[in-house]
Amino acid sequence: MSTPTVRLPRVAKGKRPQFFDDPAIDQMMTFIIELSAEVSVVYDRLDTVERLLDAKGTISRADIEAYRANETVEAERMARRDSYLKRVFRMHQNAAPQKAEKPKAAAKPKAKAKPKAKKRRK
């Protein structure tokens, strides 16, 4: 029995969410978050290399790919990630992004008074 092939769309549908008044700030925050995630992965990979070198003295790429962190190592890494993210996003720890409120509809104006007719000079 063959497994059916699932095809996922290549492009997300719908509008991108906007959290700040200026879309450029949203874009910058996306860049920062993505870069932070990549740096965190590099930290973990470097930690793997250092641990393997301490244990073996010499390693191969296969050793790095096969390494699986135990619970103690994972706990250390989680603490490092938490500290790292707190440093990177320290300006946003206590402030959630605020989207500008839509102005409330103005009350209906009272019926306009008819303008007084100007007196014509002869």
Image (tube, rainbow, N blue to C red):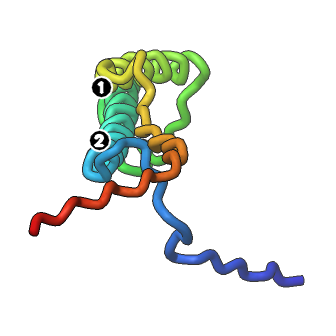
**Which residue corresponds to the image point at 53% horizontal and 69% vertical from the top-left?**
12
**Which residue corresponds to the image point at 41% horizontal and 57% vertical from the top-left?**
114
**Which residue corresponds to the image point at 49% horizontal and 64% vertical from the top-left?**
15
Q: Could you tell me the amino acid type at mark 2? A: Ile
**Which residue corresponds to the image point at 42% horizontal and 33% vertical from the top-left?**
98
- For residue 68, above or below residue 80: below
Q: Could you tell me the amino acid type at mark 1? A: Val
Name the outermost residue toward the left.
Answer: 122
Residue 35 visible (yes or no): no
Classify 10 Å Cα crowding around label 2: few (below 14), some (14-19), many (20 and above): some
Given residues 50 and 94, the one toward you in this image is: 94
- Residue 117 marker: none
Which percent across, then down, holds residue 122? 9, 69
Name the outermost residue toward the right.
Answer: 1
Q: Pick the quarter of the image with the N terminus.
A: bottom right
Q: Mark 1 points at which residue?
A: 88
- Residue 32 marker: 2
Whole-angstrom CA distance, mark 1 to mark 2, is: 9 Å
Which element type, helix, strand or loop, lies under badge 1? Answer: helix
Which percent across, then down, holds residue 45? 37, 38
- For residue 1, above or below residue 88: below
Given residues 121 and 104, the one toward you in this image is: 121
Question: With 70 as the anchor, is 112 left or right in this view?
Answer: left
Which element type, helix, strand or loop, lies under badge 2? Answer: helix
